[in-house]
Image (cartoon, rainbow, N blue to C red):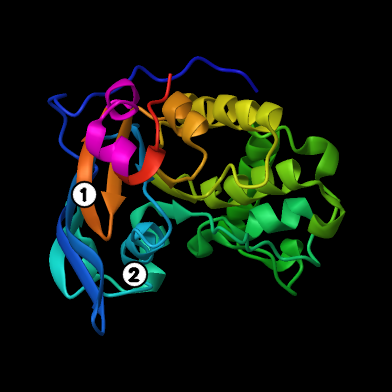
Amino acid sequence: MAAPAHPRQSAGDALSPLLSVRGLTLRFGNVTALDGLAFDVAPAEIVAVIGPNGAGKTTLFDCLSRLATPDAGEVAFMGHALLAEPAHRVAHLGIGRTFQQGALFERLSVADNLRLGLDGRHASRGLVSAALRPARWRDAEATNDARVAQLMTLFALAPYAERMPPELPVPIRRRVEIARAMAAAPKLLLLDEPAAGLSASEVADLRTLLHAVRAREATAMLLVEHNVPFVMSVADRVVAIDCGRKLAEGPPSVMARHPDVVRAYLGTEIG
């Protein structure tokens, strides 16, 4: 599972952003969940969004997944105006997501959960016998099977291929959730509280896994997370928000001591 981490990107790198968020604002009645939020994610960069409960982190993910529509602002992803796209187009554009509560199909095996994460345009399981399908469908099935096998290896899931999610311990379920989100090879992966419920050693394994996934797949990641030591060890850059507004952003070593971030969220300097 171990792999060298991708070279760290900085906010000043001369790369066109993969994701560009500008002025994102969303109100629920008198409550402002997002207030002019702006940041970028570079290709293959890992960016963490931190902040207290109610800061707007999950609302941000819902906007990027097109499960919520902001009142103002723009989001560009790989040259596409993301906010003009319906929710069902998000995965096709190259964005994957995990959810804080998980969303596995409990009565399907691990392998079949991964198959469901494949791009729907190439789904090939059905009632018709493979022998009667056109050759292109049989080719698509072979491609899908190869991708599932690749994910099984990358995420060390082969021993669990035929197990059902209720039989799995939390760390393995988390791997399955991330592997399924990676099935269609997204360019950007949204990770919602990936370290929740994990022990210190399991969090360390997760950090190694995410760096391995980035190295193998060249996938950028945007994660929201409350486990600050994990954030500081896995992310290239950290964006701190509070009440929907950006407090500061920068490399973990700077953010761990930023006075506004310490005052609003950390409580004490880290490291």
Chief secondary structure of the magenta span?
helix
Of residues 248 and 264, the one drawn nearer to the viewer in this rendering: 264
Q: Is residue 248 above or below residue 36?
A: above
In x, y percent, where is residue 57?
A: 37, 57
Q: Can you identify the residue that label 2 sits on?
A: 66
In x, y percent, where is residue 184?
A: 50, 50
Q: Is residue 138 above or below residue 233?
A: below
Residue 249 picture quarter: top left
Magenta extent: 251-263
Of residues 269 and 196, the one drawn nearer to the viewer in this rendering: 269
Residue 219 picture quarter: top left
Q: CA distance from mark 1 to mark 2?
A: 21 Å
Q: How many marks?
A: 2
Which dot marks residue 18? none
Which of discs 1 and 2 lies nearer the camera? The answer is 1
Q: Can you identify the residue that label 1 sits on?
A: 246
Q: Is residue 145 visible?
A: no
Give the left or right position of residue 178, taking residue 97 as reference: right
Give the left or right position of residue 136, taking residue 239 as reference: right
Task: Name the quadrant of the C terminus.
Answer: top left
Q: Residue at x 66, y 66 (%)?
A: 133
Of residues 173 and 54, the one drawn nearer to the viewer in this rendering: 54
Q: Dot 2 lies on which element?
A: loop
Q: Residue at x 13, y 70 (%)?
A: 72
Q: Is residue 212 above or below residue 247?
A: above
